[in-house]
Amino acid sequence: MKGIIHVLTGPTAVGKTELALRWAETNDAEIVSCDALLFYRGMDIGTAKPTADERARVPHHLIDLCAVSEGMDVTAYVAKAQAAVADITARGKRVLVAGGSGFYLKSFFAPVADDVEVPAELRGEINAKLANEGLAALVADLHALNPQGLGALDVANPRRVTRALERCRASGKPLDVLAAEFARMPSPFAGWDVRCTQLDREAAELDNRVASRVDGMIDDGLVDEVERLRVEGLEKNLSAARAIGYRETLAMLDGVLPRTELAAEIVKNTRALVKKQRTWFRTQLPEHRVLSAQLATVESVFGG
């Protein structure tokens, strides 16, 4: 066994940040972020990114890695997370992974991406075809490369169709062969003892916390943040521009959403995200501990 990785997860606004800080301080640990939006410099208010004071309390890793105009994917995340975990443990510190972003979180328990490398030229070619000929053209290409069928692929989802076609073209293999090879891959953190606790709260209480957080973000300058990030290229990065809090603010700035409805729209979409997160934790993670955030303490969070 290489060592222990503690993972603290839970839905948005459940209260992970403060408990993670206190646990890390008490246990001489450093925090590895598992939040898909904390990678981007300048996305601070709308992501509830740990503040400078909080990051001074405990060293954090995988935050502010790249400009908002740049993309970040799970393959790059896994490599950086492996390096961070190795660095932390080499210095005799404990590792606490904190966050709730689906595939990034799952990477601590199972393989989440194959090793097919897609050349930039091929990716550009496929994206151009999507833009010029539409999704149906890409689906037709996939059917031609996969005479056995497309399995459970969501052919209405442009991103998934694009990724599937990229991988088939780059590897020269159909999806069923790629799936079989993927199933045999080891977890990126094979050999580690990964211990996971999920925080949760009663629905009404979490709804109230979401509404309070959104009000605070707007009061703290979310609109100004989005205006600045737009100048820095936010909309070149679809994952960032479509993130909750950012997409609604962009719509408001474009006159599509009235300013008076901004908070309510963000709250509605955040609550929908919370529902999806809970489903993800239940169906995509291995068996793990679920703990009431109201009852969680530094001593009890991991069953100690």
Image (spheres, rainbow, N blue to C red):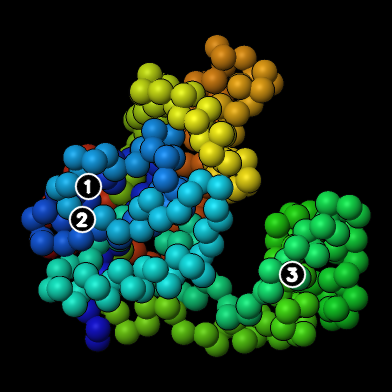
Label 3: which residue?
121
What is the spatial separation of the Cα atoms under label 3 and label 1, in whole angstroms? 39 Å
SS of the residue at dot 3?
helix
Q: Residues within 10 Å of mark 1 (few under 14, many from 20)?
A: some
Q: Position of residue 27 (x, y in %)?
A: 10, 61
**What residue sits 44% from the left and 40% below the top?**
43
Type of residue at label 2? Pro
Question: Residue under circle 2?
Answer: 59
> Residue 287: x, y in percent?
38, 67
Residue 128 seen in the figure: yes
For badge 3, the amino acid type reads Glu
Left or right: where 271 falls relative to 62: right
What secondary structure is marked by label 2? loop
Whichever of labels 3 and 1 marks the residue nearer the N terminus, that label is 1
Residue 187 or residue 248, whichever sits in front: 248
Q: Earlier in the sequence, mark 2 or mark 3?
A: 2
**Viewer-nearest of discs 2 and 3:** 3
Judged from this view, the residue extending furthest toward the top is 260
267 to 7, vertically: above or below: above
- As measured in the structure, the alpha-carbon distance from the residue carrying label 2 to the one carrying label 3 is 38 Å
Q: In the rendered view, would you say 289 is above or below 273?
A: below
In the image, which is nearer the foreground, mark 3 or mark 1?
3
Left or right: where does residue 80 sit relative to residue 185? left
Name the image quarter holding residue 71: bottom right
Q: Nearer the viewer, residue 18 or 132?
A: 132
- The image quadrant that residue 118 belongs to is bottom right
Q: Say whether marks 1 and 2 touch (CB < 8 Å).
A: yes
Disc 3 packing (10 Å; few <14; some 14–19; many ≥20):
few
Q: Tell me the crowding category of disc 2: few under 14, some 14 to 19, or many 20 or more residues within 10 angstroms, Cα based.
A: some
